[in-house]
Image (tube, rainbow, N blue to C red):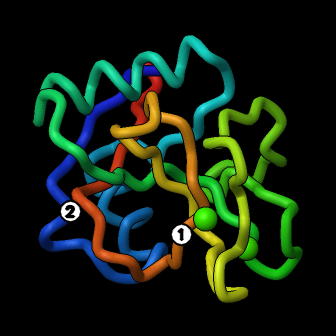
Amino acid sequence: MFSDVHDGSLWLGYTPTRCHACRQKGGHLASVESADENARVEAAIKAVVGDKASYWWIGGMDYGAEGRFVWYPLNKVVDYKNFVPGEPNNSYGAEDCLAVDSTKQYKWNDVGCNAQVEGYVCAFIR
Ligand SMILES: [Ca+2]
Ligand SMILES: [Ca+2]
């Protein structure tokens, strides 16, 4: 998996829009299926914005089945997990999309799917 990150300013909206944006670039919204892949996501983000405090979308979500996260573009159940301690907490009953938090060792938080974050991470199989 090769990860690339994209400024989300044009694509802060709905998850299908983010997925579509990655598809148009020939990839998919990133799944993170191992510590190694998480490290690649971290490196890709740092290459773009350095150590800036920011959230970035990855492709996991628990639409429809609360607490059961699926890598949306691949329709694979999230097996490897790398959540910030205390997450996922489905805050206000309305957090169904996963983002990495650069201030928490690039671990994951579930956040509202329409939250304004820095950008999103696409993955490209090479
Ligand atoms: Ca949720
Ligand atoms: Ca959360």
Which secondary structure lies at badge 1? Answer: strand
Question: In this image, 57 relative to 107: left or right?
Answer: left
Would you call the spot at circle 1 few (<14 residues within 10 Å), some (14-19), or many (20 or more)?
many
Question: In this image, 96 relative to 6: left or right?
Answer: right
Front in this rendered view, residue 28 or 88: 88
The answer to whether mark 1 is within 8 Å of ligand 2 is yes
Q: Which residue lies furthest to the top in this view?
A: 36
Question: In this image, 1 relative to 33: left or right?
Answer: left
Which amino acid lies under the numbered mark 2 shown in the image of this protein? Gly
Which secondary structure lies at badge 2? Answer: loop
> Circle 1 sits on which residue?
111
Taking the spot 25% from the left edge, 56% from the top edge, the residue there is 119
Q: Quadrant of residue 78?
A: top right
> Circle 2 sits on which residue?
8
Taking the spot 67% from the left edge, 49% from the top edge, the residue there is 74
Count of numbered badges drawn on the protein: 2
